[in-house]
Structure formats: structure tokens, C-alpha cells
Amino acid sequence: MPTTKKNLFAYRELIAALVWKNIVVRYKQAYLGLLWAVLKPLMLMLIFTLVRSFVGIETGDIPYPILTFAALLPWIFFQESCSEGINSITANTSLIKKIYFPREVFPLTAMVTKLVELAISFIILAGLMIYYQMMPTIYALWVPAIILYTMLIALTISFFGAALNVYYRDVAQALPVALSLLMYGSPVIYPLTLVHKKLIEEQAAGAWSNDLYTLYTLNPLAGIIDSFQRVILKGIPPDFDAIYPGLILTLVILPISYLFFKRAENWFADVI
């Protein structure tokens, strides 16, 4: 890992150049430019708000539109970082065949590109907070740590998926389906407090309730989304009981995913 850090630092200018290239290529001929980055969360927020008006979802004192938008920020950052990361090796075939540099540069570049788009979404979130007269508190300082945690999860999936995608192109096709299903297993449309209320307080699943809640929080996005909403909108610290299961799982799988990627990269140029 120390060697990896040195390599990434040595190639920091290449990463910056690739990030800039990704942004320019993506938005070069788009009239709205980077504003397209915020259209997706805004449209999903409106759709979810419409659905909520029919089914009813308890959100406490927090208006549902801003609660959902705050959930969509880390979710979309994670989702698109994974999608771009898994395709990052096959999308840069010409570079991989010409010169050598650490191949982890590509998944990392895809994720950093999404950080730029995430920053723009934060501006919209700030506007919504002003509209709803909500002020951030000292707990908002947890946001960088939450984003860093999200980056680790995205890299965990990107390393493993990018390596597999070189050999099995079906991986890139299956990922959007898997992530769409995962969204319903994450507190995006509904808050984590609702899951906690049903399983922990009301024991809706009987003897299985506590185990099901732990299983639910093994999804790292559950703790991330809930923590993001808590520190930004509610002005309270993260719920570490909801974070720990997913965090432990991520810290176990990330090194395995990275080692798998490094082992597979020896044959990228031959197979791709």
C-alpha cells in the first residue's frame, strides 16, 4: 500500500489531466454543461416526492424533498463512480496498450471526476437548505469523512468490477441492474429511521427483526446516507451503530479487491 500511494502521488498530474479530459469530453457540446450533473438528482427528487404523496412516508420534521435530495447526493456519487470505474479500463484501451503506469489510476480518475459533479450538487443542496430555512451545525464537519467512506466503497467495487470487466464484458451490463436493486435496499426513498422503527422498535419481523436490521446495515450505503442526512439536515452526529457493520465489511473486502485488481492487471494489455 505505501508503494501504491507513492505511485499515485507520482502520477497525480496524469490523474488531473484525465479528469479534465473526462469532464471536457462529457460536457463539450452540452448547452447546459455541468448543470446536467444536478438534473438527475433533481428529477429523481421530484419523482420520489410525487410517489410519496400517494403512499405516505414518515420523515419527521424534515421536508421530504430535501431529505430525499440529501440521500441522492451520496447515492448517485457512489452509483456513477462504480459505473464509470468498472468501464474505466476498457474505455482506455489505447493508453493501456501504449505505455505503463499504475492501472488503478483509471478507477480513481473516474471517481475524482464524479467528485467535481458532487460539488455542484452541494450548491443545489445549499439552495434547498436556504429555501427551507435550515442551517448547518458543527456536525456538518463530518461530511468529508462520509464522502471519503463513500469513495472507499466505490473503489472496492470498481477495482474488482474493472478487472472482471476486462475478461467478462457482461459485468458492465449487469452492474446497472444490481445497483438499481441496491437502491431499494438503501434509505434513499425512505429514511433509515423508518427501518429502525419497524424492525428494532416494533419488532415487525418477530425474532428475526434484530438480525434483519444488522443485515440491512451491512449495506454500507445505509449508514452513509443516514449519516449524511443527520449531520447536514438534522444537526446531530452520525449513528455509528448503523455505520459499523458496513464499514467493517468494506475494510475487509477493499484489500482483497485491490489485490485482485493488481493480480489481473498483468494481463490487461493482452486481453483487452
Image (tube, grey):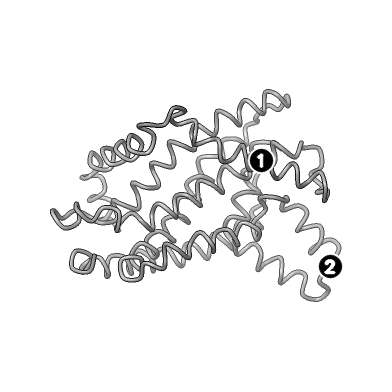
The quadrant holding residue 138 is top right
Q: Is residue 53 left or right of residue 8?
A: right
Looking at the image, which is closer to me, 38 or 108? Answer: 38
Q: Which mark is residue 45?
A: 1
Comparing labels 2 and 1, the label whose residue is closer to the camera: 1
- Which numbered disc, 2 or 1, marks the residue that appears first in the sequence? 1
Q: Count of labels shown?
A: 2
Q: Which mark is residue 139?
A: none
Looking at the image, which is closer to me, 115 or 189? Answer: 189
Q: Which amino acid type corresponds to the residue marked 2 in the rendered image?
A: Ala
Question: Residue 101: image x %, image y %?
Answer: 19, 53
Task: Give the class, few, some or many, for how many residues have Cα within 10 Å of label 2's Cα (few <14, many ≥20).
Answer: some
- Quote the CA–CA distance across marks 2 and 1: 28 Å
The residue at 46%/37% (across/down) is 117
Q: Which amino acid type corresponds to the residue marked 1 in the rendered image?
A: Met
Element assignment for label 2: loop
Indicate the quadrant containing the N terminus: top left, top right, bottom left or bottom right.
Answer: bottom left
Compared to residue 66, the image places residue 132 above or below, namely above
For the view shown, which residue lies furthest in the bottom direction?
207
Question: Residue 217: image x %, image y %?
Answer: 64, 62
Q: Which mark is residue 204?
A: 2
Element assignment for label 1: helix
Q: Is residue 12 left or right of residue 172?
A: left
Callout 2–callout 1 Cβ contact below 8 Å:
no
Question: Residue 102: image x %, image y %?
Answer: 23, 55
Indicate the quadrant containing the C terminus: top left, top right, bottom left or bottom right.
Answer: bottom left
For the view shown, which residue lies furthest in the right direction?
202
Compared to residue 169, the image places residue 229 above or below, namely above
